[in-house]
Amino acid sequence: MLQKLTYTVLFLLIGLYSFTGTTQTSEGSKKDSTTISISPNLYKPLAPARAAFYSAVLPGLGQAFNGKYWKVPIVYAALGTSVYAYSFNNTNYKKFQKAFKLRQNGKSDAYDGLEGRPFLSVDALERAQKLYRKDRDLSLLAGVGIYVLQIVEASVNAHLLQFNVNENLSYGPQFSFDPVSNNAIVGAGLNFKF
């Protein structure tokens, strides 16, 4: 079964490769289709590096350089969320750490309660302190990850913007309706236009 699949894939690749040989022009002469002329305005080899540099200097600037302005608010929302989460967790961590240290020294803290009955025990203060420290560290890690991810995204997008994507070479699903059998026909089409 695997051998048949391998031969089928090999046959399809050879068949697809044979289409790229030569084409006939309107004058009747043969033209080699493997030579591709690239306009210097379309291909900018340093654009991905420049987009990555811009994103590293100021988050979202690489996306703006690529012309994807709608991604800039997403970058700032993601970075802002991680900064807010870090600030929230750090504030609560310090609050519980201070209460824990005061309780260890026998002084009153924010969670003492009334008549010597504390709202939170020493173990609860310690657990809350550890939880907020862990969440603070995860928020910091998420922020760094989002920062690196937006740099990589700007670079990859700049690479992909340089590809020639038009209808002359396309692959896509084709849907048609058979009026005789009253059934839908689904297929795939590969279009070559020279």
Image: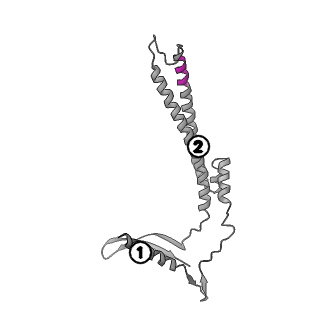
**3D distance between C-alphas at marks 1 and 2:** 47 Å
For residue 127, say whether it is visible.
yes
**What number is the disc on residue 176?**
none
- x and y percent of residue 150 in the render? 59, 50
For residue 73, say whether it is visible.
no
Task: Looking at the image, tell me whether mark 1 or mark 2 is earlier in sequence order.
Answer: 1
Q: Decide: is 84 above or below 157.
A: above
- x and y percent of residue 152 in the render? 59, 53
Amino acid type assigned to the residue bearing label 1 in the image: Tyr
The reply, left or right, for residue 122 in relation to residue 75 is left
Among all residues in the image, which is located at the extreme top? Answer: 115
Q: Which residues are magenta?
A: 95-103
Name the residue beneath numbered marker 2: 144
Which type of secondary structure does the marked residue at label 1 adopt?
Answer: helix
- x and y percent of residue 192 in the render? 52, 76
- For image coordinates 52% across by 21% down, the residue present is 100
**What number is the disc on residue 7?**
1
Amino acid type assigned to the residue bearing label 2 in the image: Val
Magenta: main secondary structure: helix
The foreground one among 115 and 145 is 145
Looking at the image, do the residues carrying marks 1 and 2 touch, with CB atoms under 8 Å apart?
A: no
Q: Residues within 10 Å of mark 2 (few under 14, many from 20)?
A: few
Among all residues in the image, which is located at the extreme front? Answer: 3
